[in-house]
Amino acid sequence: MKRHTPEDVKREINEEVAREVLKKKYLSFTINQLGINEDLVGKKTSICCALVITNLEDKKIDYNIDGSGKGLVDALFNALTAGLVGDCHSLANLCLEEFSVNVDEADLRKLRRTGRGTDAHVVTSLRINNGNGKLIPFESRNQSMITSSVDVVRKTIEFFVNSERAVLRLKDLIEDAEKRNRSDLCERYTIMLSSLIYNTSYEKSLKEG
């Protein structure tokens, strides 16, 4: 089992902060109808998919996403950031620092006792450079390498989009608390904002928000 790192804990804390701030407006991402075209000679991967974004108020937005890159993860990451960066400026700061796909060795050993072990789970891991020199880890576990890779990219984009939206919401909450002379709320919201700013730079978003 993968050891829980301080970076994992920090990411989980910030996800909870975003959920608390956004409440029913927290966005969930789903990727389906994925098409993949591999140019084996040209070493280029093209993808197209349907991205469905919903919140707890049952509001839904559909995107048709397509793009290309050097492999599935690169192509999907490029396509999603290009499709959403107009609404979420901090996505432009992100850079993939580390990428790995590993078999779950404990699962493999267990499955070898009754079969070939080819149905063992794999774990796809990403470490994202947020533009501030911080590396934020994400991972997904599945029996399909494709599903695992798609899901870890989905988790990454969902995390940063909600983080930015929470930052903008906290900006409004702080301004409102200051107008009402609620120093207690102002302090609380400022602490939450400081935690989220760890994720990436929101300078452009704050200026335009």
Image (tube, rainbow, N blue to C red):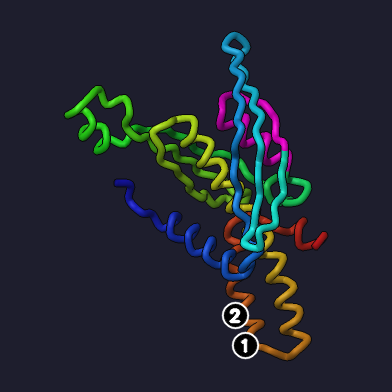
- Is 117 left, or right, of 174 in this rendering? left
The answer to whether residue 185 is above or below residue 41 is below
Q: In the figure, residue 189 lies in which quadrant?
A: bottom right
Q: CA distance from mark 2 to mark 1?
A: 6 Å
Task: Identify the disc placed on residue 12.
Answer: none
Q: Position of residue 191 (x, y in %)?
A: 58, 74
- Residue at 58% from the left image edge and 53% from the top image edge: 159
Span shown in magenta: 64-83
The answer to whether residue 184 is above or below residue 197 is below
| Amino acid on which the number 2 mark rests in the picture | Arg
Q: In the figure, residue 177 lies in which quadrant?
A: bottom right
- Residue at 50% from the left image edge and 35% from the top image edge: 149
Badge 2 vs badge 1, beta-carbon distance below 8 Å: yes
Q: How many marks?
A: 2
Task: Identify the disc placed on residue 188.
Answer: 2
Dot 2: what SS? helix
Q: In the figure, residue 39 lies in which quadrant?
A: top right
Task: Identify the disc placed on residue 184.
Answer: 1
